Image (cartoon, grey):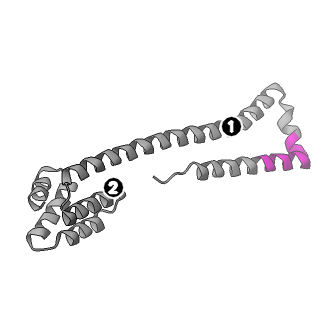
Amino acid sequence: MQTALAIAGDELADPAGREIAHMSRELDLGTPLDAAFERLQERIPGRDLSVLVSTLVISHRSGGSLITALRDLSFTLEERKETAREVRTLVAESSYTGYMVAGMGIVLLCLLMFMNDQVLHSMTSTVVGQLALLIAGVGYAVGIVLINRMTRVKL
């Protein structure tokens, strides 16, 4: 394991190569493998690295097949990335649909003004019209905020 990490530290591009080389030096100085992986995880926080570290530590402790574990981990991480891409695509579709619906109100108001230029004047000259415009504006603002919150997905 130490030899593989030393080679990976030399071969990989920075910043990953630098961090693995740092971990390899820690191992050379007598740091236990578990502690070196924990420090790596503290320096580079991330869900994927956490899963990789857990896999490597368990494989090292149990003496299981490291190649099989890494192959399965690679497959799982690729599937996770694919699922994340699909979710982002679906969320983007929903948010753009929401923005289109919100924009339709403004387009319809402009269309009404184009057809009859007195529409906006009659809406802004009376209290009822002003209240209707205010309620519509607040409704649009709330709708856009809700669309943003509902389509925000942490992957």
Q: Position of residue 30 (x, y in %)?
A: 10, 74
Element on which disc 1 rests = helix
Please tell me whether the stretch drawn in magenta is mainly helix, strand or loop. helix
Which mark is first along the chain, 1 or 2?
2
Q: Quadrant of the N terminus?
A: bottom left
- Within 10 Å of disc 2 (Cα), the crowding (few <14, some 14-19, many 20+) is few
Q: State the image quarter where residue 61 is shown.
A: bottom left
Amino acid under label 2?
Answer: Asp
Placement of 58 over or under 95, stated as above or below: below
- Within 10 Å of disc 1 (Cα), the crowding (few <14, some 14-19, many 20+) is some
Answer yes or no: is residue 125 visible: yes
Please state which of residues 3 and 155 is positioned toward the viewer in this rendering: 3
Amino acid under label 1?
Answer: Val
Query: Magenta residues?
Result: 123-136
Please state which of residues 33 and 98 is positioned toward the viewer in this rendering: 33
Q: Kindly indicate whether the residue at mark 1 contacts the one at mark 2 (C-beta within 8 angstroms).
A: no
Please state which of residues 49 and 120 is positioned toward the viewer in this rendering: 49
Q: Is residue 133 in the magenta section?
A: yes
| Residue picked out by circle 1 | 101
Q: Could you tell me which residue is drawn at 15 percent across and 64 percent down?
A: 22
| Residue picked out by circle 2 | 48
Q: Position of residue 135 (x, y in %)?
A: 80, 50
